Image: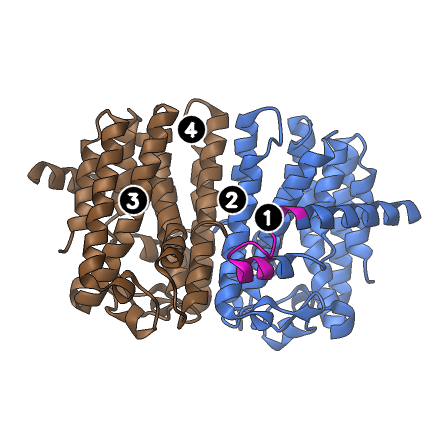
Chain colours: A blue, B brown
Amino acid sequence: MPDFQNWISEHQLRFEEVLKHLLASADLAPQQLHAAMRYSVLDGGKRVRPLLAFAAGELAGADVSRVNIAAAAVEFIHAYSLVHDDMPCMDDDVLRRGKATCHVEFDEATALLVGDALQSLAFQLLSENCLCDDATRQLQMVKLLAVASGSRGMAGGQAIDLESVGKHLTLTELEHMHIHKTGALIRAAILLGAHCGNLSQVQLDKLDRYGKCIGLAFQVVDDVLDSEADTVTLGKTAGKDAKKEKPTYVTLMGVSDAKKMARELHQEALQSLAECGGKTHRLNELADFIVMRKF
Amino acid sequence: MPDFQNWISEHQLRFEEVLKHLLASADLAPQQLHAAMRYSVLDGGKRVRPLLAFAAGELAGADVSRVNIAAAAVEFIHAYSLVHDDMPCMDDDVLRRGKATCHVEFDEATALLVGDALQSLAFQLLSENCLCDDATRQLQMVKLLAVASGSRGMAGGQAIDLESVGKHLTLTELEHMHIHKTGALIRAAILLGAHCGNLSQVQLDKLDRYGKCIGLAFQVVDDVLDSEADTVTLGKTAGKDAKKEKPTYVTLMGVSDAKKMARELHQEALQSLAECGGKTHRLNELADFIVMRKF
């Protein structure tokens, strides 16, 4: 898929500049906080959520300058969650995206504030820029990201994850955790990208179904990669979930069934796109990319 | 001021029910996270920021049901900042509002997530409820809270505070820190309450000036109280700033000059209210309350 690879590279490069521009300069007080925010967001990450937002935006005929903002808001939420997740009281990890985690490079207090301030910045972006012509709908976009981030979304998924360490989870419980922990923000990325343009409610529902499948598939693949890859390939500490006795799709189903599940979710995602209609080819390619990235 | 005391008590009692209603039930999964969120917000606090929002709302002729939401959003941001601020990597405090801090009662990871989820909830509230008839203006309200919370507001103030430990600050630098650390959210509370109703831009500017003075006075009084009171009266660990070699108005100016500064800020706040005009008596009384609460 050379065309798709170009599409990814172009968006990644352009989006890196967008992020640089939206983050406060490290010259601006408080300098250490701003430097640490830039450190935690820039020069790393596959930008999967932004790419999904851009693909959904293309489907919805959205202005890319608007999708930039929505995608950045989602990426700031994602980046804050990684910074907090890596802290000693959570996963206590020292390596992220191939470099020292924020609390190692700076200190814990700074990492705490970096996460807090990145979350605020996400909501600032969604409220200070015109993202769609209807302000009431834009308020719904703010709500969408807030719900996806909060106690019934990503933060709630993290809490379920914490409670599950050392416990036996059923497959349903594991799915429940991931639908919140990673799925909510992936779905939000897709829907926010779409809301920058125009789609029917039926199309939005199909897209959301796609997002739900892709979000779960993403996690299943992550578990497989975590169980198989080494630290250098992964850019973060490998095998850490198994070491911490965290339940994963691999520990519950075995590698083979986990791969099968990822393929089934992949198919369901493509089916939902087919029912959505329109220019969905980038979303199709992203589904392939997410599921087949390493196996 | 028996009438004013009644006004405070009535609003505090009613607002406690509002907060209980807006926080997810502890029966709802993830239960521990929701229980910890309720623990951190309910049954404590003077609710100074909400009271300021209610008083500004009365001045602006706002519907109290709208101000409830705006005030709760501000209080959730405030509560999250206390939870994170008390954590071992920040102030490492065990007592808050007369009870164990969140990370002591639960654990550090939960406290981290409580703060994160409370921030999300604040923005959810501001976006999912109708707070003013003009959705574009409501987006500005979201922005106002986001900026007040972020790296150029409260979180930034915390960062400046961290950097200042053990350093000599000038009075200007100390003021700069507090304008961000506590002042930004106090001003946001007042302006958000006002935006739920209708005021002219000139009136909003006068109110903002009032908020700036009151915010600083609040901090000066806090420093004086912290240096003079004991732990039981304060409901939090007394004298901790001095112990940590954090610069305060008292360490920089002495108690007597700090009290004088609080009185001058108080006068400036009242002057700004006089120029604002309208039903400002509750804001007047709150200024008295904040400055004269303990000396």
Identify residue type, mark 1.
Answer: Ala
Q: Chain of mark 4?
A: B
Task: Return the residue at label 4.
Answer: B130
> Callout 4: 10 Å neighbours few (<14), some, many (20+)?
some
Q: CA distance from mark 1 to mark 4?
A: 24 Å
Q: Tell me whether the residue at label 2 lies in contact with that at label 3, contact meaning CB atoms closer than 8 angstroms.
A: no
Identify residue type, mark 2.
Answer: Val
The magenta segment: A21-37
Q: Quadrant of the N terminus of chain B?
A: top left
Residue A136 drawn at (x, y percent): 53, 26
Identify residue type, mark 4.
Answer: Cys
Q: Tell me whether the residue at label 1 lies in contact with that at label 2, contact meaning CB atoms closer than 8 angstroms.
A: yes
Q: Chain of mark 2?
A: A
Label 4 SS: loop
Q: CA distance from mark 1 to mark 3?
A: 42 Å
Q: CA distance from mark 2 to mark 3?
A: 35 Å
Question: Residue B246, relative to residue A270: is it above or below?
Answer: below
Q: Chain of mark 3?
A: B
Label 1 SS: helix
Task: Return the residue at label 1.
Answer: A184
